[in-house]
């Protein structure tokens, strides 16, 4: 006798699956989450003008996992800021899920950012006197969901990064890797279409870095689109596609030939005692 309902209630689905379900229907044929067309970015600094992006064009499909590499100053963060609607191009177009956001004002960008983008940065950026659970809840404060739902989503996101048992810990009571996992949970709590990570392993030791990559690979396997900036070739190999930036342009764009699986790599690395 099987009493399981044929259709899983949305609340019983993993958070990332719901992120995908909740994605509005795209105009037909728009399989790309991200379409960038001839984007330039200039920064005006007094008399001087820095040309940080010099004609970047690219498409990223739903469910891709892209790593961006390149020398310091090559435009990676500038590009990520545009992808994440933190900044807009000086010229060119950016279509996010089929909508041209290139000329949106700050308010419209903030709205889209909160709905569609999750961010993870090198420096974790957690609030110090705030628990893991409260840190994870923060992005939901700008949405209309009620407190109990807020708490439920945050707990769920923490569970997804393996930190259900650390919900009431403060950042100072957690390791760097755990803090970064809280930052990943916070990035997921609004069920974004894209996860953007700018050097998420930059402050972590090598084992902990692979643990973060394991989480990103798992999320990506479940359909989340991930774009990651890294200076480390080993870390970039966990993605499915690697872009190399130089002088504000994409110079290489290649699939990863034999991608290591982070959970397998972890088995070969020594564990540190808790
Ligand atoms: N807010 C800003 N104002 C002026 N110039 C900027 C600004 N942000 C970046 N730049 C300049 O734009 C260029 C690209 O910078 P960006 O931060 O995108 O590089 P990056 O590839 O992320 O480097 P890194 O690996 O060091 O993080 C650099 O020449 C930088 O000095
Ligand atoms: Mg940078």
Image: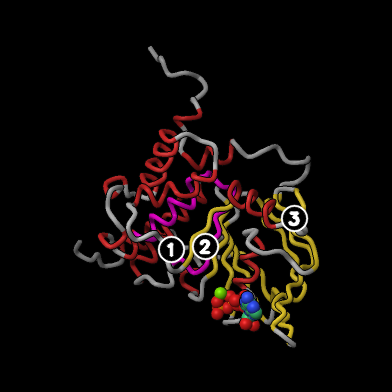
For this orientation, the residue located farthest to the left is 273
**Ligand 2 shown in quarter:** bottom right
Residue tagged 3: 104
**Disc 2 from disc 1: Cα separation:** 13 Å
Percent coordinates x, y for residue 143 in the rendering: 54, 41
Question: Looking at the image, which is closer to me, 8 or 170?
Answer: 170
- Which segment did they paint magenta? 179-200
- Label 3: element kind: loop
Q: In the rendered image, which quarter is residue 86 located in? A: bottom right
**Disc 2 from disc 3: Cα separation:** 23 Å
For this orientation, the residue located farthest to the front is 46
Q: Earlier in the sequence, mark 2 or mark 1?
A: 1
- Left or right, 46 with reference to 173: right
Percent coordinates x, y for residue 116 in the rendering: 61, 48
Residue tagged 1: 125
The quadrant of the picture occupied by the C terminus is: bottom left
192 magenta-colored: yes
Q: Nearer the viewer, mark 2 or mark 3?
A: 3
Give the residue drawn at x 71%, y 59%: 59
Above or below — where is 76 with respect to 120? below
Instruction: For the residues labelled 3 and 1, say whether their Cβ atoms are less than 8 Å apart.
Output: no
Percent coordinates x, y for residue 70 in the rendering: 59, 78
For label 2, the crowd category at 10 Å Cα-Cα, with few meaning under 14, some 14 to 19 and many 20 or more, is: many
Q: In the rendered image, which quarter is residue 34 located in? A: bottom right
Specify whether residue 74 is in view.
no
Q: Earlier in the sequence, mark 3 or mark 1?
A: 3
Q: Earlier in the sequence, mark 2 or mark 3?
A: 3
For label 3, the crowd category at 10 Å Cα-Cα, with few meaning under 14, some 14 to 19 and many 20 or more, is: some
Percent coordinates x, y for residue 28 in the rendering: 78, 40
Residue tagged 2: 197
Instruction: For the residues labelled 2 and 1, say whether their Cβ atoms are less than 8 Å apart.
Output: no
């Amino acid at each position: 006798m099987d009493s399981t309902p044929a259709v899983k209630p949305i609340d019983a689905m993993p958070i990332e699956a719901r992120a995908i379900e909740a994605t509005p229907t795209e105009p037909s044929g728009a399989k790309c989450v991200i379409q960038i067309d001839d984007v330039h970015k200039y920064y005006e600094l007094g008399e001087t003008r820095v040309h940080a992006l010099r004609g970047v064009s690219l498409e990223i499909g739903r469910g891709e996992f892209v790593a961006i590499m390149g020398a310091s100053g090559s435009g990676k963060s500038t590009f990520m800021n545009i992808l994440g609607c933190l900044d807009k191009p000086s010229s060119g177009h950016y279509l996010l899920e089929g909508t041209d956001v290139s000329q949106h004002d700050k308010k419209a960008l903030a709205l889209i950012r909160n709905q569609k983008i999750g961010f993870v940065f090198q420096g974790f950026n957690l609030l110090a006197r705030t628990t893991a659970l409260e840190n994870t809840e923060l992005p939901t404060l700008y949405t209309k969901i009620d407190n109990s739902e807020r708490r439920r989503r945050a707990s769920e996101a923490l569970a997804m990064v393996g930190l259900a048992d650390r919900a009431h810990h403060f950042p100072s009571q957690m390791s760097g890797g755990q803090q970064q996992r809280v930052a990943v949970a916070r990035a997921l709590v609004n069920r974004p279409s894209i996860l953007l990570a700018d050097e998420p392993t930059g402050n972590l030791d090598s084992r902990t870095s692979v643990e973060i990559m394991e989480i990103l690979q798992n999320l990506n396997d479940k359909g989340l689109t991930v774009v990651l900036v890294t200076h480390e070739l080993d870390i970039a190999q966990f993605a499915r596609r690697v872009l190399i930036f130089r002088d504000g342009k994409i110079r290489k764009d290649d699939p990863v030939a034999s991608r290591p699986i982070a959970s397998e790599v972890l088995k070969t690395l020594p564990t540190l005692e808790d």
